Amino acid sequence: MKKNILYIAMACLALGFTACSDDPEDAVEKHVYGPEEAPYLRADAGANITYNAEFRKGHVVPKTIYLKDYAEQIQTKMKMTVDDMLAGLETGKVVFYNINTARGIWNKAAATKGSNGWWYNASGLVSDASTGVASIELDKAKKALILTVPEESAAGVSVAANVGFAIDNGKDYDDYIRFNVNFAVTDPGTIIRDISIPDGDYNYAELSFASCENAISACFGLSVADFNSALEVDDIMMYIVKDDGSWITDASYTASPGYWMDVKNVITNWSADGYKAGNFYFLETHTEDVGMRIGRAPAVPSGSGVKAHFVYADKNDFSKYIEFVLNITFE
């Protein structure tokens, strides 16, 4: 008899353990969260907006997510317009916070960028500017989220951050819209080549744009043919890169089209005297050959060399460019 009572007691104890759950959605009555508590994140795939923010190393330009572009989704999930949602931030009806995806909760951390934004470290956690590698900030006037990375960011930065707007009904944040932002700093358009130029005045080596097809596609979103056409009408221009990494954007072409350069990589003018007059080599775009020529001035000493550093860039959008570093040897 005692044995039967023991078995019954053990069975009741086991049932008691299995009835307990930490999942808020398993509770008979939902927990009401206080001001200092972090509400759980109710799973809702339809409320999630993914945005990939890719930045170019060396020429970082902020990205903008316009909330109006997601007005329909906001209306569906929060039952309000974008304007109503932003107005709700002022009254406290709506909150704008981070989301801790690892723990499945909202993060009420205070702003670390301006009054409506945060910096994130390399692990995607809220941080300050000293350790931040990316940031999200709400611009109420523009009705937009502004995404940035530091200007000096190196290629290879990759971090995800999640922010969301939610209705604060006094007990949970179940009605919300969430932005999952994937930050990346890339360097898809740096082309490093060794170039050997045959002996003889004005001799040159050729570099075809077809050999740069992947970089052209990644950086401009153009085919090689369309890239070549843009060069023909000067929508894309060649700019010399100085030692400090800045571009010379106010110099006129001194070759056709392109530049004559001296041994210190300073732009020079054409001269029939070549090396004696200071010219060392030239960089020329040749759209008829769908490529460029890298050539030597007269009397350049055989065995000498130089590093050419330049870009082809969209003259109206400097975030679109490919960069060339050519190690030139004169045979």
Image (cartoon, grey):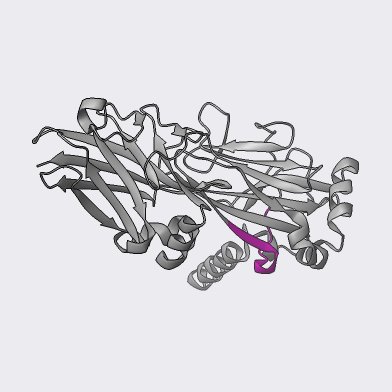
Visible in this render: residue 30? no
Q: Residue at x 20, y 49 (%)?
A: 204
Seen in the picture, residue 184 relative to 25 is either above or below; the reply is: above
Seen in the picture, residue 138 relative to 236 is either above or below; the reply is: above
Seen in the picture, residue 302 relative to 84 is either above or below; the reply is: above
Seen in the picture, residue 80 relative to 185 is either above or below; the reply is: below
**Total label count?**
0
Q: Residue at x 20, y 51 (%)?
A: 205
The part of the image, by quadrant, that contains residue 325 is top left
* Closest to the observer, 295 or 79: 295
* Closest to the observer, 317 or 31: 317
Q: Residue at x 40, y 44 (%)?
A: 311
Visible in this render: residue 45? yes
Question: Residue 166: image x %, image y %?
Answer: 77, 53
* Closest to the observer, 212 or 135: 212
In reply to whether residue 50 is colored magenta, the answer given is yes
Question: Residue 53: image x %, image y %?
Answer: 55, 52
- Which residue range is magenta in the image? 40-51
Question: Residue 227: image x %, image y %?
Answer: 45, 61
Quadrant in which the C terminus appears: top left
116 displayed left or right of 223: right
255 displayed left or right of 75: left
In reply to whether residue 221 is colored magenta, the answer given is no
Q: Residue at x 47, y 40 (%)?
A: 122
